[in-house]
């Protein structure tokens, strides 16, 4: 069997897969924060084009990918499935390890899969500009390129700590035509309020979302785009897992375990949901494991509650595992995972015991990333290294048990713009971080008043 499994362009999926259609317990609806009643299309129309709103609430199992989006996908899709034979040898494991590599996209990550879709639907409805947030910069890069491809202007609010840590992400976004602002900024009320209370704030995804939403809501020619969390965003990413299923068929193998890091949920959903369908239908009992940072452990230490998706409270209330929308994560290098909540779909699946979650300390993740680079020749993004760390745990467990198992993970992006993070790791500047229970309890208590009666 070849180490790399490629598909032809003719194998490019024609539909996205909507896991909500197969879930035994459907997700609870988003609520209006004032009335605590389910939000309707008119509540979301100032932020999103109507087709994306329809996808957000769609009960359909398959949603057709427009030709205009499939045409752009052909720039880098289908992406390869690779057998990690060198990593297997280094670990001396009986496990078979495969990874789907998304780092060959124009943004260097999986984020382009939804960026093309969102830019397309906005262009089709006459939108002139899209405004968004970004953590580590992968989403901002993807949307910047997508907007350039579809003739849209793009503004990006980048979390301050990542804005400072990853200057070359700013450069590539600007190269693709976007305007990039450090968040919190003085350009919005949400940003000014944060700076007034904390002038040295390192920012958070929640704050950056607030700034982007505020700017979009105030301009009829501008819409907002989110890189994770929402149902339609996760939907677009399922092209990853659908391709992987066909590639696994060519190998004659099928994963026992599917692994991906989780910040908001799009990466994890993209690889796992099409495989999870087999479990939901009762045909195969695949384990799907979401990996989060121990310093931002919404899945493993948060609570399932209604909460805002942003810090200022501009968004509808979402039913999700959360640490509270005022939670401020520590400045770890995995900026894409520093989000207080998880997607509604992933949260409900975890609540129902259909997926698993683990939290990782960053030193173990960087150690895993370095080993992967030495063996497989690809430097993973710090976010992706979280998934690799869990892969190594699973491979070692297979060795201890003396039994083979098949492991699949999503290598969601390369780390070429994250060299400072690796430099800090080699120089001993990074440390593990234990989040105090009291901080979590305090932030959770602050959202008690938001819960519906």
Image (cartoon, rainbow, N blue to C red):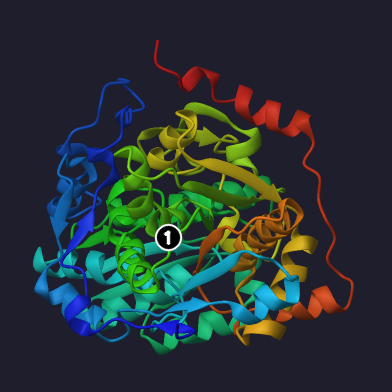
Number of marks drawn: 1
**On the image, which quarter does residue 80 sit in?**
bottom left
In the figure, is residue 28 to the left or right of 350? Answer: left
Farthest residue to the right: give it. 428
Tell me the residue at 64%/78% (across/down): 418
Q: Which of 160 and 25 is in front in this view?
A: 25
Percent of width and height locating residue 77: 30, 80
**On the image, which quarter does residue 376 sit in?**
bottom right
Q: In this view, does 238 lie above or below 169?
A: above
Q: Name the residue under label 1.
A: 254
In the figure, is residue 410 to the left or right of 378? Answer: left
Percent of width and height locating residue 82: 48, 78
Q: Can residue 185 be seen in this view?
A: no
Tell me the residue at 30%/35% (across/down): 23
The N terminus - image quarter: bottom left
The C terminus - image quarter: top left
Tell me the residue at 74%/70% (across/down): 91
Percent of width and height locating residue 111: 40, 68
Q: Is residue 292 visible?
A: yes
Q: In this view, does 321 lie above or below 183?
A: above
In the figure, is residue 132 to the left or right of 150? Answer: right
Q: Residues within 10 Å of mark 1 (few under 14, many from 20)?
A: many
Q: SS of the residue at dot 1?
A: loop
Q: Nearer the viewer, residue 317 or 345?
A: 345
Percent of width and height locating residue 317: 39, 32
Farthest residue to the top: give it. 453
């Amino acid at each position: 069997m070849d180490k790399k499994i490629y598909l032809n362009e003719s194998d490019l999926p024609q539909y996205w897969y909507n896991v909500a259609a197969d879930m035994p317990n459907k997700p609870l609806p988003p609520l209006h924060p004032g009335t605590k009643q389910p939000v309707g299309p008119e509540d979301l129309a100032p932020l999103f084009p109507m087709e994306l709103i329809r996808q957000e609430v769609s009960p359909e199992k398959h949603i057709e990918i427009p030709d205009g989006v499939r045409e752009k996908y052909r720039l880098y899709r289908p992406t390869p499935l690779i057998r990690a034979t060198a990593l297997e040898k280094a670990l001396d494991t009986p496990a078979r390890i495969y990874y789907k590599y998304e780092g060959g996209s124009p943004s260097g990550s999986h984020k382009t899969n939804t960026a093309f879709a969102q830019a397309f639907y906005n262009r089709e409805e006459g939108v002139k500009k899209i405004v968004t947030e970004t953590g580590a910069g992968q989403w901002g890069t993807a949307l910047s390129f997508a907007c350039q491809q579809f003739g849209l202007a793009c503004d990006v609010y980048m979390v301050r700590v990542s804005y400072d840590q990853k200057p070359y992400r700013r450069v590539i976004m600007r190269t693709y035509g976007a305007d990039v602002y450090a968040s919190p900024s003085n350009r919005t009320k949400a940003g000014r309020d944060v700076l007034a209370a904390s002038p040295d704030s390192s920012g958070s995804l929640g704050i950056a979302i607030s700034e982007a939403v505020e700017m979009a809501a105030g301009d009829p020619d501008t819409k907002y785009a989110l890189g994770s969390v929402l149902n339609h965003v996760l939907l677009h990413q399922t092209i990853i897992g659908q391709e992987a299923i066909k590639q696994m068929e060519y190998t004659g193998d099928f994963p026992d375990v599917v692994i991906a890091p989780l910040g908001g949920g799009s990466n994890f959903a993209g690889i796992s949901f099409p495989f999870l369908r087999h479990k939901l239908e009762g045909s195969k009992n695949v384990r799907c494991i979401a990996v989060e940072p121990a310093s931002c452990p919404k899945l493993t230490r948060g609570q399932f509650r209604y909460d805002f998706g942003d810090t200022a409270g501009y968004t509808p209330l979402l039913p999700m595992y959360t640490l509270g929308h005022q939670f401020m994560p520590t400045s770890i290098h995995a900026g894409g995972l520093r989000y207080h909540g998880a997607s509604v779909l992933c949260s409900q699946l975890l609540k129902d015991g259909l997926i698993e979650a683990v939290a990782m300390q960053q030193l173990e993740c960087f150690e895993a990333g370095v080993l992967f680079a030495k063996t497989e020749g690809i430097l993973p993004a710090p976010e992706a290294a979280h998934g690799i760390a869990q892969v190594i745990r699973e491979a070692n467990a297979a060795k201890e048990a003396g039994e083979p198992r098949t492991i699949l993970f999503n290598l969601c992006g390369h780390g070429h713009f994250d060299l400072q993070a690796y430099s800090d790791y080699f120089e001993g500047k990074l440390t593990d971080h234990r989040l105090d229970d009291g901080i979590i309890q305090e932030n959770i208590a602050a959202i008690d008043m938001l819960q519906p009666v």
